[in-house]
Amino acid sequence: MSCEFPTVNENPEEMRALFESVKTIAIPGLSPKEDKPSHRVAKYLQAQGFKIIPIYPKEDFILGEKVYRSLAEVEEKIDMVDMFRKAEVADLIVDAIEKRDDVKVLWLQEGIVNNSAAQRAKDLGLKVVQNKCTMVEHRGL
C-alpha cells in the first residue's frame, strides 16, 4: 500500500500551507461513536478551529454539527474532504468532488490508498494526501 505519485505526503512546507488554506473539512465516514478514530480526529480538528461537516448515512448531528448523507447535499463551501471510508469509495468521493467547484484537498486517512482516485483528484487540481492521519500531521506542525 504505497502512493505511486508525488503528493504533499512528504513535504512539511506544503503540508503546513495546506492546513493554513483549509477552514472547512467534510468528513465522509465520521462515526458518532466516540471510540472510533474518525470521531477522535474530527473532535481534534474541531477543537483546533476547523469547521467540520459530518457525512454519514444516519444520525442528525455529530459533534454538534448537522450530518449530511453525501457531499452533494452540502451547500456550504468545503475546503477539504477527509475520508474515513474504504479505499474503493474514494472513486465515488472524487466523482462527487468533480461536481463541486470548492474542494481544494482530498485527504485519504491512514491506511487508505487509492492511487487512481488520487490521480483523478490531482488532475482536477486538488492537493492529495494518502495514508496519513490529519490529526497526527496537524499536531506535527
Image: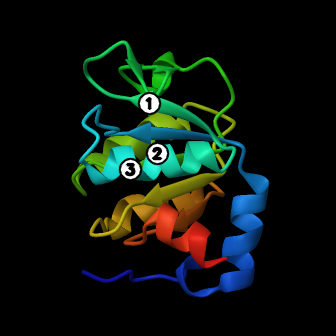
The foreground one among 39 and 114 is 39
Mark-to-mark CA distance, 1 and 2: 9 Å
The foreground one among 104 and 42 is 42
Which residue is outermost to the bottom? Answer: 10
What residue is shown at x 31% (from left), y 83% (from top)? 2
Proximity of marks 3 and 1: CB atoms separated by less than 8 Å: no
Proximity of marks 1 and 2: CB atoms separated by less than 8 Å: yes
Where does the image place residue 88, in percent across and percent down from the top left?
22, 53
What residue is shown at x 66% (from left), y 73% (from top)? 15
Q: Quadrant of residue 141?
A: bottom right
- Mark 1 highlights which residue? 54
Pair 1/2: label in front: 2
Can residue 20 be spotted in the picture?
yes
Where does the image place residue 125, in percent across and percent down from the top left?
66, 57
Kindly state the secondary structure of the residue where label 2 is placed: helix
Return the disc, 1 or 2, that comes first in the chain's sequence: 2
- Mark 3 highlights which residue? 40
Could you tell me the amino acid type at mark 3? Arg
Could you tell me the amino acid type at mark 2? Ala
Mark-to-mark CA distance, 3 and 1: 13 Å
- Quadrant position of the N terminus in the picture: bottom left
Can residue 80 be spotted in the picture?
no
- Mark 2 highlights which residue? 42
Proximity of marks 3 and 2: CB atoms separated by less than 8 Å: yes
Label 3: few (<14), some or many (≥20) within 10 Å? some
Q: Quadrant of residue 111?
A: bottom left
Kindly state the secondary structure of the residue where label 3 is placed: helix
Residue 28 against residue 133 in the figure, above or below: above
Where does the image place residue 57, in percent across and percent down from the top left?
26, 22
Could you tell me the amino acid type at mark 1? Pro
15 to the left or right of 83: right
Pair 3/1: label in front: 3
